[in-house]
Image (spheres, grey):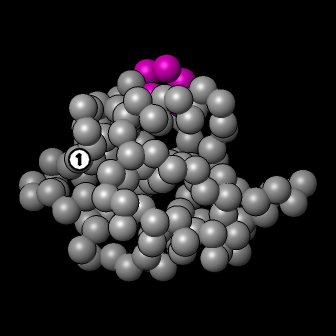
Amino acid sequence: MKLKSILGRSKKVLLVEDDVTLRSALADKCKEHGFTVLEASAADEVLAVLGSEQPDALVLDLILPMKDGITLLEELRETGYDLPVLILSNLLGSEDLRADAERLRAKFYNKSAVTLDEIVAALDDSL
């Protein structure tokens, strides 16, 4: 696994998911694989975390309170955040969403089609 940097620091991931159960399960799985985990459940929390932390990657749900994940990612990219992003969603119309993800340099995954282990593996591969 590539989780450790040259300095031995574990990779830090920001999980953005408003479903507490899924976020907790994904956080536990990431921690099992050596990630340091930061969590947020809404766009404003993401901005607060990014103001004080420097995650190596972002796992982003599309349906969030107050602002959707695509809009949030567009804003992050416009302000210079170039970290790897995995988008998770169960929304229909996934081809359009995949196109949005590609345009924003993110990878799109359907929540119901992947396991937590597959998400963590994709996260590890993106770093």
Chain part drawn in magenta: 76-81
Left or right? Give the position of 24 relative to 70.
right
Q: Quadrant of residue 5?
A: bottom right
* x, y percent for residue 105: 42, 43
Residue found at x 19% / y 62%: 90
Above or below, comparing residue 25 to residue 14 in the picture: below
Above or below, comparing residue 81 to residue 34 in the picture: above
Q: Residue furthest left?
A: 93
Give the residue type at disc 1.
Ile
Residue found at x 54% / y 24%: 80
Q: Residue furthest front?
A: 20
In terms of secondary structure, where does tag 1 sit? loop
Q: Closest to the observer: 86 or 37?
A: 37
Based on the picture, tell me whether residue 77 belongs to the magenta stretch: yes
Based on the picture, tell me whether residue 72 belongs to the magenta stretch: no
How packed mark 1 is, by other alpha carbons closer than 10 Å (few <14, some 14-19, many 20 or more), is some
The residue where tag 1 is placed is 63
Left or right? Give the position of 29 relative to 35.
left
Residue found at x 9% / y 58%: 92
Q: Closest to the observer: 83 or 116?
A: 116
Above or below, comparing residue 81 to residue 100 in the picture: above
Is residue 87 visible to the viewer in this orientation of the structure? no
* x, y percent for residue 115: 38, 79
* x, y percent for residue 12: 66, 52
Quadrant showing the N terminus: bottom right
Left or right? Give the position of 52 relative to 106.
right
* x, y percent for residue 101: 31, 46
